[in-house]
Image (cartoon, grey):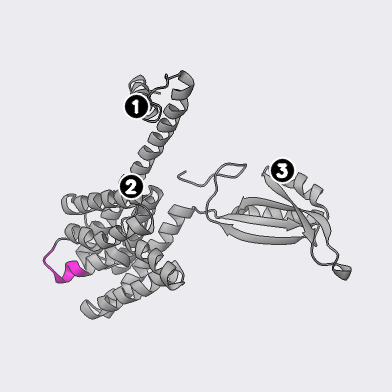
Amino acid sequence: MNPILSKLLIDIARKKIKSKQPDSPLTKKQIEPVVNNLSVELKHTIKEYIFIIIGVFSAGFGLKGFLLPNRFIDGGATGISLLLQNITPLSLGVLLIIVNLPFLILATQTINVKFAVRSIIAIAFLAIVVHFVDYPIITQDKLLIAVFGGFFLGLGIGMSMRGGSVIDGTEVLAIFLSRKLSITVGDVLLLINIIIFSFGAYILSIETALYAILTYLAAGKTVDYVVDGVEEYVGVTIISEKHDELREMITDKLRRACTIYAGKGGYGKKGKSYDKDIIYTVVTRLELARLHTEIDKIDSSAFIIMGIVKDIKGGMIKRKPLK
């Protein structure tokens, strides 16, 4: 670690410990864990803000290089801002802040204050970039505008999410309404965007609204790729009498970790249960075919349950990109 940074962290640690234990002498053992925690937190914060900066410049490129010069719109708060930019004298940078502000205030209650503050910084930075940075106009072909404008905008949104913030506040509203109305976040976002695209068709044209849907789909797919990676994690539960052979295959042949649950079978004569081991492991979707092949080699009648795992940390698992 840089010696100046190390000294700064030690000074901060001393102040923290003094505030908690004003009368106790400070020892090296007391300071070291706090310094390590502060160092890790600082590294993560720097990495997250790098993601946000990349995301903001990418979103700015999608907006000013593709969508804005050709009067295209997108979904979400960005789409509302683009729509208002076509019918009001206000600049897009100002509209991005105005439109997103209510969603960010809601974020302090729905998620947490830290997330809201980081999102405010990200959106304010995006407004500055959109207002002051001159991006070249790439193309006037409508199909290319819709696809690549959506791609760069989605890349920006996804990178900002990887940095622990949003540059489009409608996701916050969707989370809030899903809790209140007992519907999914995806359904809420779909309803919001249907309303936005309907206004787009009325104010601009039906053709523009249709291209906006294509832009939204391109952005959405790009966000999924950036946040989840090309290889989704799949949690696999295996129930088999040959659990020992399956465990050895997973750990030795596939080089993946697994967890063994002690379970009881509920299906049997006269309702009697019986003990059995249950294997749980996590693989990427690209490894799933090989896992099925190896399981069939050992026990073709094994009972297998699979489910998508959104994210994972630690263990013997292949890393996603951008981690």
Q: Residue at x 53, y 51 (%)?
A: 311
Q: Secondary structure at mark 1?
A: helix
Q: Residues within 10 Å of mark 3 (few under 14, many from 20)?
A: some
Residue at which label 2 appears: 52
Q: Position of residue 133 (x, y in %)?
A: 19, 49
Residue at which label 3 appears: 251
The answer to whether marks 3 and 2 mark residues whose Cβ atoms lie closer than 8 Å is no
Q: Residue at x 81, y 47 (%)?
A: 244
Q: Earlier in the sequence, mark 1 or mark 2?
A: 1
Residue 87, above or below 14:
below
Location of residue 314 (image quadrant): top right
Residue 161, above or below 95:
above
**Kind of residue indicated by mark 2:** Ile
**Kind of residue indicated by mark 1:** Lys
Residue at which label 1 appears: 15
Which residues fall within the magenta stretch? 84-90
Q: Quarter of the image for the N terminus: give it.
A: top left
